[in-house]
């Protein structure tokens, strides 16, 4: 990678914090499509984690940082926990449980509209074995009657005595202020882990790759998005005007998938590029010149190097 790429959205080493600062980690845990990534973005106040209608979009832990005065909260968006079938699935689920086990607190996110499914029950049972403080967060409350919400909260608390129950809509902001205030008051004493102006632990290059992968998920169907990955091969900050030149490769596992991702006359990959470029320009606040290429990398899900690139531990 060339050019001078900054880390996250802040630069430099964390400053010496004042006395009595608080800082802690909160794992956002739930089944796929519970709204964890939407919640993380709402907590931080901007997009740091990609969001699609498809399940299992988040592949590795993503940290969003919220700093309020002398308190810093690091929220960890973990992959959705489900019954894994493939090697990549196992790596994602392992990453989620690792994030939960290492956190100071756990927020169990449940889609209130879907209620208690088999996946939710299995996850609740697994969380009961972790000893750190846990709260229940019922998300998407705008889709459910109040009576049903109260019944759902009572049933979930009967199996696990959560320290607190919150009812929110991450999409429209309902209940978010109370949730932030709760965690802010309960962070342990300690120095900040990130500069106060930093909002994510992702580099600009990885953020850019995640945004393109989001557009790929939205455009493609069936198994193709799950068999593809995006890597930023070049990230250059142009000295002339401060704009970003980004070159990325969409890797797929089969030649037939490459033809689909390219589309007739290259129209599909062009549309993905247009949408990704618009989002990146808005996020970074500078013009973005995005160049996308599609290549076949057979059996990439069996390559340990690819897992390291995604921030995942390669499962044996």
Image (tube, helix red, strand yellow):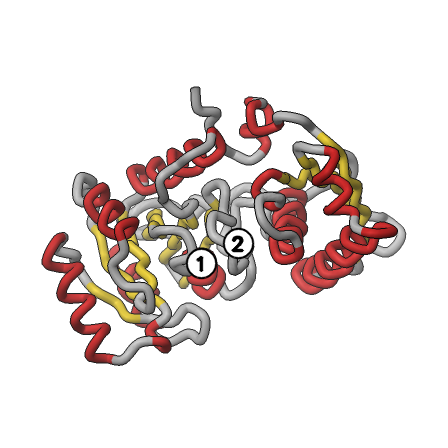
Residue 276 in the figure: left or right of residue 130: right
Instruction: Look at the numbered discs 2 and 1 and tell me whether their residues touch, using CB distance below 8 Å.
Output: yes
Residue 114: image x %, image y %? 32, 64
* Circle nearer the N terminus (2, 1): 1
Disc on res. 165? none
Q: Which residue: 73% across, 32% down?
A: 296
Residue 229: image x %, image y %? 63, 39
* Disc 1 secondary structure class: helix
Check the image and name the residue furthest to the top: 316
User: How many numbered tags mark residues here?
Assistant: 2
Residue 314: image x %, image y %? 48, 25
Disc on res. 40? 1
Q: Which residue: 38% across, 72% down?
A: 169
Residues packed near mark 1 inside 10 Å, few (<14), some (14 to 19) or many (20 plus): many
Query: Looking at the image, can residue 23 be seen?
Result: no
Residue 159 in the figure: left or right of residue 64: left
Residue 97 in the figure: left or right of residue 260: left
Residue 89 lies in what quarter of the image? Answer: top left
Q: Which residue: 39% across, 54% down?
A: 72
Name the residue nearer the viewer: 100 or 303: 303
Query: Looking at the image, can residue 213 be seen?
Result: yes
Q: Which residue: 31% across, 60% down?
A: 110
């Amino acid at each position: 990678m060339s050019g001078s790429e900054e880390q996250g959205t802040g630069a430099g080493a964390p400053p010496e914090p004042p006395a009595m600062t608080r800082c802690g980690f909160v794992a956002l845990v739930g089944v796929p499509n519970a709204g964890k990534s939407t919640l993380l973005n709402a907590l931080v106040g901007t997009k740091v984690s990609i969001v699609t209608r498809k399940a299992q979009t988040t592949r590795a832990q993503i940290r969003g940082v919220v700093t309020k005065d002398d308190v810093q909260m690091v929220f960890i968006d973990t992959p959705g926990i489900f019954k894994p079938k493939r090697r990549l699935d196992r790596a994602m689920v392992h990453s989620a449980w690792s994030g939960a086990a290492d956190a100071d607190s756990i927020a169990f996110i449940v889609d209130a509209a879907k209620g208690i499914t088999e996946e939710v029950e299995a996850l609740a049972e697994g969380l009961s074995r972790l000893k750190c403080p846990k709260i229940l967060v019922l998300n998407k409350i705008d889709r459910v009657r109040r009576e049903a919400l109260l019944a759902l909260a009572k049933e979930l608390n009967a199996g696990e005595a959560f320290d607190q129950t919150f009812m929110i809509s991450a999409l429209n902001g309902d209940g978010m202020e109370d949730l932030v205030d709760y965690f802010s008051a309960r962070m342990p004493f300690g120095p900040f882990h990130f500069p106060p102006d930093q909002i994510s632990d992702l580099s600009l290059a990885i953020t850019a790759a995640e945004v393109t992968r989001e557009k790929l998920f939205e455009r493609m169907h069936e198994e193709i998005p799950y068999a593809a990955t995006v890597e930023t091969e070049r990230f250059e900050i142009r000295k002339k005007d401060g704009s970003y030149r980004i070159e990325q490769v969409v890797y797929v596992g089969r030649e037939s998938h490459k033809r689909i991702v390219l589309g007739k006359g290259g129209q599909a990959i062009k549309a993905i590029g247009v949408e990704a470029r618009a989002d990146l320009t808005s996020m970074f606040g500078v013009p973005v010149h995005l160049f996308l290429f599609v290549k076949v990398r057979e059996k990439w899900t069996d390559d340990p190097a690819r897992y390291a690139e995604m921030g995942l531990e390669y499962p044996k």
